[in-house]
């Protein structure tokens, strides 16, 4: 008999099939039992009718505990009430009778659920979130592949800092020390001079000492980098990119968004033209809204929320003060207090999901920045080479996967967006 996955049951109407899965829910009466099975691809109701089963199978079914592993054979039918596909059971094999499952119907605290993350992601909500994450990751790769980008994997063990020394994880490296990568960008800049359009996609590490709903210590970032590109090019690219990903999620993950009760009209808004404003305009707007942000300060989470609540669609803020941005940013030729950086801020208070911009292409400027930041020039000689041999304008950005998943799924915290979250006080399971 053919084993089928629950997501494809509709193709087997009136046929006899086999499903391999786990018991999610059990409702019994004297003559009929309903058991909801999940198999990773979906959830379906299976119906056990006493009159149609042998005595032994009926009794075994009655004794099934939640999360027991089973193989069920039966006929696929469509429930006339809700149009859902279900299985009229003919036989049952118990692969493993589960011990009492620690996660039940009652409310559990977040810490308890996080301690049981390895079991928690069997639940429907967590399953839906991680399926959407999968689709986002696939859409990210497809977007860059379709646009002619070459994947250049950047290293995780690095000798230097790229996004400030305060968030570096240090590890022993034989008789020396190394750091976990904060960004692949420095490695991509030389690569775009070899391959034109490149991207890297992998885990990224920041020793964030703050407990916020937007920060993980290990997160996934995708970073495109393009030779000859300017700030405007990457602003446009970031907009096309987010539209592409959200379109994919809307088209392919409707059932999962329904499980999450996500208001998809909010996601449709991402398909509208993004709002664009300079940092200077954003500061004025924020001050008018009552924020106490001063020119020259980075926006806090509250500022980002305040600004994004004004619009339905994402906002691209560009041209930031040099003082709080990374050493590698290209200065604004119109105003030397500014750099050609950009951030994409998500609506509904989700805040910054993309950061990037144009990179300094002049070696003299970069040398002065390295000196100013008291970085060891020797460590950056290889990076400076991009400016020695056919230096071009170039630009790129980084998108954080977990913040994007939280936003698309409408979640209050990034901890549910990655299978095994790593945070200030969490390193297990
Ligand atoms: O703005 P960031 O720090 O930019 C860079 O690292 C650039 N070098 C990227 C580039 O231009 N190639 O980080 C980019 C994005 C943020 O917008 C955010 O979405 C995510 O990475 N991010 C985090 N996500 C979760 N937890 C953290 N601690 C994060 N830090 C950054
Ligand atoms: Mg940033």
Image (cartoon, grey):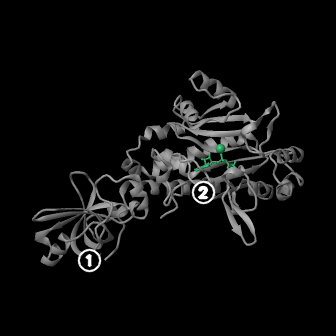
Which residue is tagged 1? 93
Q: Is residue 127 visible?
A: no
Q: Is residue 37 left or right of residue 326?
A: left
Label 1 Cα crowd, 10 Å radius (few <14 / some 14-19 / many 20+): some
Residue at the spot 77% in from the left edge and 43% down from the top edge: 329
Q: In the rendered view, would you say 339 is above or below 156?
A: above
Residue at the spot 27% in from the left edge and 69% down from the top edge: 15
- Please name whichever residue, 249 or 210, is drawn nearer the observer in this view of the structure: 210
Label 2 Cα crowd, 10 Å radius (few <14 / some 14-19 / many 20+): some
The furthest residue to the top: 288
Measured from the top left, where is residue 83 in percent x and y? 26, 53
- Please name whichever residue, 362 or 209, is drawn nearer the observer in this view of the structure: 209
Residue at the spot 19% in from the left edge and 71% down from the top edge: 63
Measured from the top left, where is residue 150 in percent x and y? 70, 59
Which residue is tagged 2? 141
Quadrant in which the N terminus appears: bottom left
Q: Give the quarter of the image for residue 26.
A: bottom left
Q: In the rendered view, would you say 303 is above or below 121?
A: above
- Please name whichever residue, 353 or 116, is drawn nearer the observer in this view of the structure: 116
Q: Give the quarter of the image for residue 345.
A: top right
Disc 2 Cβ-to-ligand 1 distance below 8 Å = no
């Amino acid at each position: 008999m053919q084993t089928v996955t629950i997501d494809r049951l509709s193709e087997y109407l009136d046929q006899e099939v086999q499903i391999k899965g786990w018991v999610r829910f059990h409702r019994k009466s004297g003559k009929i039992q309903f058991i909801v099975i999940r198999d990773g691809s979906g959830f379906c109701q299976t119906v056990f009718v006493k009159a149609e089963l042998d005595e032994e199978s009926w009794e075994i079914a009655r004794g099934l505990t939640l999360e027991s592993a089973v193989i069920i054979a039966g006929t696929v039918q469509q429930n006339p009430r809700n149009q859902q596909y279900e299985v009229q059971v003919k036989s049952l094999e118990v692969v493993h009778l589960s011990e009492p499952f620690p996660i039940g119907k009652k409310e559990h605290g977040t810490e308890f659920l996080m301690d049981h993350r390895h079991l928690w992601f069997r639940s429907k909500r967590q399953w839906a979130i991680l399926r959407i994450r999968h689709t986002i990751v696939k859409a990210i790769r497809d977007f860059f592949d379709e646009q002619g980008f070459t994947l250049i994997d950047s290293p995780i063990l690095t000798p230097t800092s790229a996004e400030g020394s305060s968030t570096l994880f240090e590890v022993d490296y034989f008789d020396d020390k190394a750091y976990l990568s904060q960004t692949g960008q420095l490695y991509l800049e030389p690569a775009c001079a070899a391959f034109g359009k490149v991207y890297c996609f992998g885990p990224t590490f920041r020793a964030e000492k703050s407990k916020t709903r937007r920060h993980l210590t290990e997160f996934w970032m995708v970073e495109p980098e393009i030779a000859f590109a300017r700030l405007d090019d990457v602003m446009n690219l970031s907009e096309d990119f987010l539209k592409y990903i959200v379109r994919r999620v809307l088209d392919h993950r409707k059932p999962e968004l329904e499980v999450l009760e996500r208001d998809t009209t909010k996601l449709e808004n991402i398909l509208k033209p993004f709002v664009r404003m300079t940092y200077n305009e954003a500061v004025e707007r924020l001050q008018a809204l009552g924020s106490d942000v001063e020119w020259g300060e980075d926006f806090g989470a509250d500022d980002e929320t305040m600004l994004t609540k004004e619009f339905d669609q994402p906002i691209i803020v560009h041209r930031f003060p040099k003082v709080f941005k990374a050493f590698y940013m290209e200065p604004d030729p119109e105003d030397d207090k500014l750099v050609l950086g950009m951030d994409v801020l998500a609506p509904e208070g989700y805040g910054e999901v993309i950061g990037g911009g144009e990179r300094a292409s002049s070696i003299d400027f970069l040398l002065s920045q390295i000196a100013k930041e008291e970085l060891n020039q020797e460590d950056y000689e290889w990076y400076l080479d991009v400016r020695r041999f056919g230096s071009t304008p170039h630009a790129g950005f980084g998108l954080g996967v977990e913040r994007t998943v939280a936003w698309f799924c409408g979640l209050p915290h990034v901890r549910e967006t990655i299978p095994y979250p790593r945070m200030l006080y969490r390193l297990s399971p």
